[in-house]
Amino acid sequence: MATNKKKIFITQTLSQGARALLTQRDDIELVEFANLISAKDFEALLKSHAPVHGVALGATAFGETELEASKDMKVVTRIGVGYDAVDVPALSRRKVPLMVAGSANSPSVAEQALFMMLTLAKRANELHACVKDGKWADRLGMLPFDLYGKTVLIIGFGRIGSRTAKRCLAMEMTVQVYDPYKPAAEIKAAGCEPVADLDAALPHADFVTIHCPKTPETVGLFDAARIRRMKPKSYLINTARGGIVKEAALYDALVSGKLAGAGIDVFEVEPPPVSNALFALPNVIIAPHVAGVTVEAVSRMSEQTARNILSVLDGDPIRQNIINQDVLG
């Protein structure tokens, strides 16, 4: 009967494969909402459909207000792995698990990090313009360089960082890893060099690529003082979250020659204003927070999100995908 159905909110971006996993169940009712719906409209929508038992979130924020509006929330999922827009303590207080898409987008983000390293090292934008603008004779003044033999420092050795390490090792780079939460033995077993002191490691890295979550501990992790520790010919890549790198400090380092370049997929304010000073710099490549949103990743993340929801409703949650493990009995 319809009254026994569990009502699940899903964004319009959820893949067809994921929808099929949910719609084949006769005990589930789906309600669509826009990925970028305002907080006020989202709350109203939840209230009008309450009780709501599960939600698959894109970029929409979720916390105490939304929990109250839902009336009977059982599971909150992210179609991705970041969760800085979710009030995790609020969910934990109500024993509601927050679930993420596990490793579904980690190959995609790792590829984007390597792509940005290669694009900068091979001076792709400059050489493209050199040919297109008829400046062939200038080519020897903008020689690219190899990743081979260079040192990359990976910040964070979770699903994405560890996959990035594999790709960098394949490029025959020296791979160092800073992750205070991972045993050194685990990092060494992956063929990498663990570093315990981030500040001491920075002056030796040709590339620094960030793959840690955004937390109170990591906000502003790369501020002016830390960026100054990097060598002038090095590059900073951020495909993690905006705010981990202080954009003003990054800009100052880039224009003053204290840093060679940067690859940025995420910003302090999203979408960033078109007046963002970083946009005008020739040694910066940018992307609109899509490192983990490839065609394949969207499908993988969506289907994992559907499975996450079903696992909770069926009483057998996929434990490794739960962020607030304190809700588990």
Image (tube, helix red, strand yellow):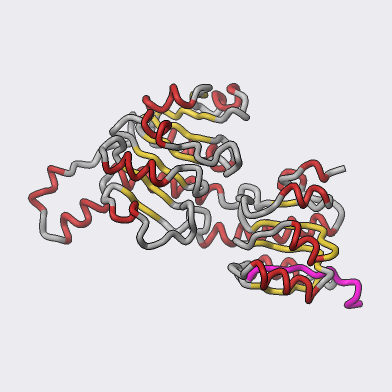
Residue at image point 61% right, 57% down: 300
Residue at image point 33% right, 33% down: 148
- Give the vertical position of 31 relative to 272 (above or below): below
Q: Is residue 3 magenta?
A: yes
The front one of 228 and 197 is 228
- Relative to 211, 224 lies left or right: left
- Relative to 36, 327 lies left or right: right
Quadrant of the snapshot with the C terminus: top right
Where is residue 134 shown, x and y percent of the image?
11, 59
The residue range painted magenta reads 1-11
Residue at image point 37% right, 42% down: 250
- Give the vertical position of 7 relative to 246 (above or below): below
Give the mark count. Answer: 0
Q: Please tell me in which quadrant of the rendered image residue 41 appears.
A: bottom right
- Give the vertical position of 53 relative to 308 (above or below): below
Where is residue 161 shown, x and y percent of the image?
53, 39
The front one of 117 and 46 is 46
Q: Please tell me in which quadrant of the rendered image residue 151 appears.
A: top left
Q: Please tell me in which quadrant of the rendered image residue 256 appears.
A: top left
Q: Is residue 119 magenta?
A: no
Where is residue 40 shown, x and y percent of the image?
67, 70
- Give the vertical position of 80 relative to 245 (above or below): below
Quadrant of the snapshot with the N terminus: bottom right
Where is residue 61 shown, x and y percent of the image?
65, 60
- Relative to 308, 177 lies left or right: left
